[in-house]
């Protein structure tokens, strides 16, 4: 008994025969027989191709889970590689851990069970000499065996028969559909989401930071492993069966996923600019620079121009975004509007933010030196504008544009701080505030070798002189009046030194000193110098002026007060009392708390 499909086939032949005879009844018997034979052959081929197509699909479907994407995502060799060009950078997205703005730390783990073969970069570069790259050379591409070799041979045989029979479109569509589903599955496991550019731009920045970090890691795996392996698989199955068929199948498979992948970076590159985005944009830029040689190798054909062009345009926009953000950051520092004085003249939050920010900028020195090519917008065109500081570029000859921008940020920060200091009513606190903040700037520069190298020791000495001058100005504003009470002038009765001392004038002098010192002590104990070394240095400097002057004055005139009534009302402090009281200064809390601490 014949199988059921033969009845279907015979029925189809009979139907086709009736149609042909009805269509051309004048045809000769021989012609009609030939036409009927051709239809039968075509139907047989269609049936055979349908079965081959199903078999092709089933074999492909059986191998869409051939490897572990998770292990690849955490394999260091998929996220960093060695440059073949001497002096090239190593990009490692764990460098993000340097960012002190609340970003999470991530670590790579080696999965030794991952099977892979080394991608022959030379073979690809030699076979496509028309591709010229302006990016550094690389050896990062790795191929994963997506389908076993013996199975590939079966797929190749099926593909050859389908293509020879004129079923190229059906073959490539089936192949692309199945392999694309495999890529989609890998994308999900890598965290690559199907988001439109609009969807991405509507996300909060905190959420985007996490997604950027994930995207950088995923993009490296996708380009260097997934797409490269898909390209190799296409070559294994379709190479030699037709002109550029392997490339057509490859693009049928990866075009959609590749566009989806790069749309994320494109959305970030054209998003609204703000200072907090700079470092993630630089991370994206560095990752894409790192990937460009691999992109040019994997997408090396004419049909994949779209992907290469998209990646290059995104890279250009990311660079422009970084330049724009730096400019906007400078403007934001200059115009930061807060007018409420920080308590105790301590370090202003703006100072901490700006210095942490430019310290992070220095971590991206190599990238930004390449991106920042012009000097900051200052100098002669701002001369005479009281709302904007000026900067003499002649003093900074030989520095890179990036270094000039960082110095300019420090200049405008100090300019803004100087304006904020005017909101303090106490002149001494004005100087203490500037001393604290300029000292913090100097210490942050010194603590970063990269930043110090760019700023330069000459400018560092200039800033050191500024905070030391502010310390001197503070001492003059505070202690000249106090020490003036300890002078000899006005205490002697006319007729010479031997004529005696005016006890009433002396009592007033002690009372004035006591009152002034108590006020200064009460007030400045609540002021704050956060840096312990600077705090101790200023206390020592105060003591070196105050203690000898008081000891000398007390030694000369103590007997005149002690011989009078109630000497304790005038000589309220011993030298030791003053020495102890000076230790209360600049701790940031009231005197009563100091007294309690000393009594404990």
Image: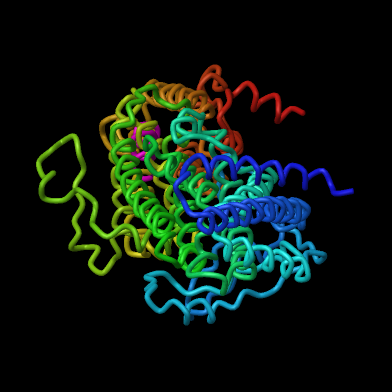
Q: Nearer the viewer, residue 503 or 129?
A: 129
- Which quadrant of the structure image shows residue 464? bottom left
User: Looking at the picture, does residue 65 appear above or below residue 546?
Assistant: below
Q: Is residue 159 above or below residue 463?
A: below
Residue 517 shows in this picture: yes
The residue lying at 50 percent from left, 33 percent from top is 205
Q: Of 469 and 373, which appears nearest the observer?
A: 373
Q: Position of residue 211 (x, y in %)?
A: 58, 41
Q: Is residue 544 visible?
A: no
From what the image shows, is residue 523 above or below residue 323? above
Q: Position of residue 5 (x, y in %)?
A: 78, 45
Q: Indicate left or right for 328 with 520 as reference.
A: left
Residue 364 is inside the magenta segment: no
Q: Is residue 472 magenta?
A: yes
Q: For the C terminus, which image quadrant?
A: top right
Q: Kindly identify the residue that appears in the image at 57 percent across and 47 percent down.
A: 215
Image x and y of residue 595, in percent: 66, 25
Labels in figure, total: 0
Give the side of residue 142 with respect to residue 327, left or right.
Answer: right
Q: Position of residue 139 (x, y in %)?
A: 57, 74
Q: Quadrant of residue 136?
A: bottom left
Q: Residue 549's quadrant in the figure?
A: top left
Q: Main secondary structure of the magenta part?
A: helix
Residue at 43 percent of width and 64 percent of height: 366
Report the residue that reaches farthest toward the right.
1
Q: Magenta residues?
A: 471-483
Q: Looking at the image, is 218 positioned above or below residue 561?
A: below
Which of the colour schemes (rainbow, by chain, secondary structure, one colour) is used? rainbow
Q: Nearer the viewer, residue 398 or 53?
A: 53
> In the picture provided, is 330 more to the left or to the right than 64?
left
Q: Nearer the viewer, residue 590 or 131?
A: 131
């Amino acid at each position: 008994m014949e199988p059921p499909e033969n009845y279907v086939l015979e029925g189809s032949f009979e139907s086709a025969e009736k149609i042909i005879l009805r269509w051309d009844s004048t045809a000769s018997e021989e012609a009609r027989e030939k036409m009927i034979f051709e239809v039968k052959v075509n139907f047989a081929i269609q049936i055979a191709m349908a079965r081959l197509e199903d078999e092709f699909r089933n074999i492909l479907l059986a191998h869409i889970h051939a490897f572990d994407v998770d292990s690849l995502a955490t394999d260091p060799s998929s996220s960093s590689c060695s440059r073949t060009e001497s002096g090239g950078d190593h990009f490692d997205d764990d460098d993000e851990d340097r960012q002190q703005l609340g970003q999470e730390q991530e670590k790579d783990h080696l999965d030794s069970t991952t099977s892979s073969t080394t991608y022959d970069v030379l073979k690809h570069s030699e076979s496509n000499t028309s591709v010229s790259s302006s990016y550094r050379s690389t050896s990062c591409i790795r191929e994963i065996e997506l389908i076993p070799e013996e199975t590939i041979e079966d797929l190749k045989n099926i593909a050859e028969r389908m293509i020879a029979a004129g079923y190229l479109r059906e073959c490539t569509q089936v192949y692309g559909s199945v392999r694309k589903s495999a890529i989609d599955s890998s994308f999900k496991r890598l965290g690559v989401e199907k988001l439109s550019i609009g969807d991405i731009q509507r996300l909060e920045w905190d959420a985007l930071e996490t997604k950027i970090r994930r995207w950088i890691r995923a993009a490296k795996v996708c380009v260097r492993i997934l797409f490269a392996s898909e390209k190799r698989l296409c070559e294994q199955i379709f190479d030699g069966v037709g002109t550029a068929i392997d490339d057509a199948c490859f693009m049928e498979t990866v075009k959609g996923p590749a566009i989806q992948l790069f749309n994320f970076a494109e959305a970030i590159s054209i998003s609204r600019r703000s200072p907090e985005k700079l470092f993630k944009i630089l991370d994206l830029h560095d990752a894409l620079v790192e990937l460009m040689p691999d992109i040019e190798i994997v997408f090396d054909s004419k049909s994949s121009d779209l992907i290469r062009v998209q990646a290059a345009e995104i890279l250009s926009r990311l660079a422009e975004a970084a330049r724009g953000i730096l400019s906007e950051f400078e403007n934001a520092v200059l115009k930061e509007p807060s007018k409420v004085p920080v308590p105790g003249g301590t370090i202003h939050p703006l100072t901490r933010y700006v210095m942490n920010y430019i310290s992070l900028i220095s971590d991206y020195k190599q990238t930004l030196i390449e991106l920042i090519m012009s000097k900051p917008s200052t100098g002669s065109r701002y001369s005479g504008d009281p709302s904007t500081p000026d900067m003499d570029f002649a003093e900074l000859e030989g520095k890179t544009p990036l270094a000039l921008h960082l110095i300019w940020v420090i200049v405008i920060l100090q300019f803004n701080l100087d304006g904020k200091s005017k909101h303090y009513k106490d002149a001494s606190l004005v100087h203490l505030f500037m001393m604290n903040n300029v000292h913090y700037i100097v210490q942050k520069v010194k603590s970063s070798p990269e930043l110090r190298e760019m700023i330069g020791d000459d400018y560092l000495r200039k800033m050191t002189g500024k905070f030391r001058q502010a310390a001197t100005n503070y001492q003059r504003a505070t202690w000249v009046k106090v020490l003036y009470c300890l002078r000899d002038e006005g205490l002697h009765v006319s007729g010479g030194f031997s004529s005696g001392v005016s006890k009433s004038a002396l009592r007033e002098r002690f009372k004035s000193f006591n009152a002034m010192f108590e006020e200064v002590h009460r007030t400045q104990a609540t002021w704050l110098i956060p840096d312990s070394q600077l705090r101790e240095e200023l206390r020592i400097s105060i003591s070196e002026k105050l203690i000898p002057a008081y000891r000398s004055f007390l030694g000369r005139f103590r007997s005149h007060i002690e011989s009078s009534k109630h000497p304790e009302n005038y000589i309220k402090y011993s030298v030791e009392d003053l020495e102890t009281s000076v230790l209360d200064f600049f701790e940031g809390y009231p005197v009563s708390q100091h007294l309690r601490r000393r009594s404990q």
